[in-house]
Image (cartoon, rainbow, N blue to C red):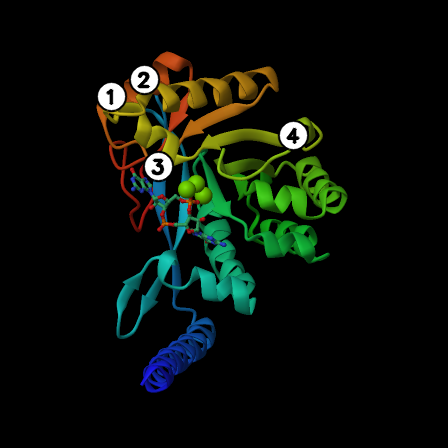
Amino acid sequence: RAKNEGRDRFAVFDEAMREQAVRSLDLEADLRRAIQRREFIPYYQPIVRLEDGVVAGHEALLRWRHEKRGLLSPAAFIALGEESGLIEQVDWLLYEQVIEELARGGSDYISVNVSPRHFRSPDFARRLLGLLDDAGADPARLRLEITEVALMDDAPRTRRMLDRLRDRGVRAVLDDFGTGFSALSYLHRFPILGLKIDRSFVAGLDAEGGREESLALVRAILALSRSLGMDTVGEGIETEAQRDTLLQLGCSAGQGYLLGRPASCRRR
Ligand code: C2E
Ligand code: MG
Ligand code: MG
Ligand code: MG
């Protein structure tokens, strides 16, 4: 009897795995088709100066305009994109559009998210600078959001790449700061303009329990950032209390639904 149960359980497990595999194959084929058809667009979310609400820049956020499933957020496909490597092609489709948008004018910056995979490609900096040159866009208005993982992956190579981009004016910031495992002693060796405080810490700023802990963490990040001469952006600001606390603690800029949702065009 026990034997039978075991076999049934195994059969169920097997079937679930098969379905999972088929689903992700479908999605991968879908993603390849979407790349051919260029179904990706940027949404722009304002990044504002907390002091007075002036828009300093925007973050370009990837959206997939899926013919059947509507507008998809990265959560629905980014893991597969990373695993399969397709995210690199998707990112390039997005960067082209963002750089065209920069070339249309304005003085604010636009930041784009950079998959860690790009830092393993020797061609990344050259190709990005080529796009900027071809469009006649000012490299100083493009910002790269990179993660701590990307920095640590192959530190010397990443540093050379970031130095080369910085020499032409393209600056980089560290995204979701505090969630990775940065070797803090490394940070100052990279040409990093600023840190984005992960929204999990910002969310804790007006939570009932655990507020003290979030306050301590945010204070520590701001102190670190200041001592390295970096800027800070607070992510995921949803309440006035969160914004006011960040401002009080000396955080100069913020991003979040309270300040502006991602939208199909930039706010002027
Ligand atoms: P991220 O770079 O940390 O982007 C911020 C995410 O937080 C965005 O989600 C944004 O819509 C969301 N957000 C902004 N304000 C708030 C808020 O007040 N509350 C809450 N709960 N969320 C807020 P989104 O657009 O779904 O992007 C998720 C992640 O996908 C991004 O996190 C980034 O890691 C990745 N991603 C986005 N665009 C690209 C891209 O073009 N290329 C690559 N490789 N990754 C991207
Ligand atoms: Mg980002
Ligand atoms: Mg972020
Ligand atoms: Mg985040």
Q: Verify CB contact (< 8 Å) between mark 3 and mark 2.
A: no
Locate residue 64, reporting x and y percent. 36, 63
Locate residue 2, reporting x and y percent. 34, 81
As helix, strand or loop, the secondary structure at mark 3 comes to strand
The one nearer the camera, 187 or 31, is 187
Which mark is drawn over residue 241? 1
As helix, strand or loop, the secondary structure at mark 1 comes to helix
Compute the Cα span from label 3 to label 2.
19 Å
Locate residue 229, reporting x and y percent. 59, 19
**Neighbour tally class for label 4: few under 14, some 14-19, many 20 plus, Cα within 10 Å:** some
**Mark 1 belongs to which amino acid?**
Ala
**Mark 4 belongs to which amino acid?**
Leu
Return the disc, 3 or 2, that comes first in the chain's sequence.
Answer: 3
Return the disc, 1 or 4, that comes first in the chain's sequence.
Answer: 4
For the point 27% across and 41% down, the residue is 261
Marks 3, 1: nearer the viewer: 1
Q: Which residue is mark 4?
A: 187
The one nearer the camera, 227 or 161, is 227
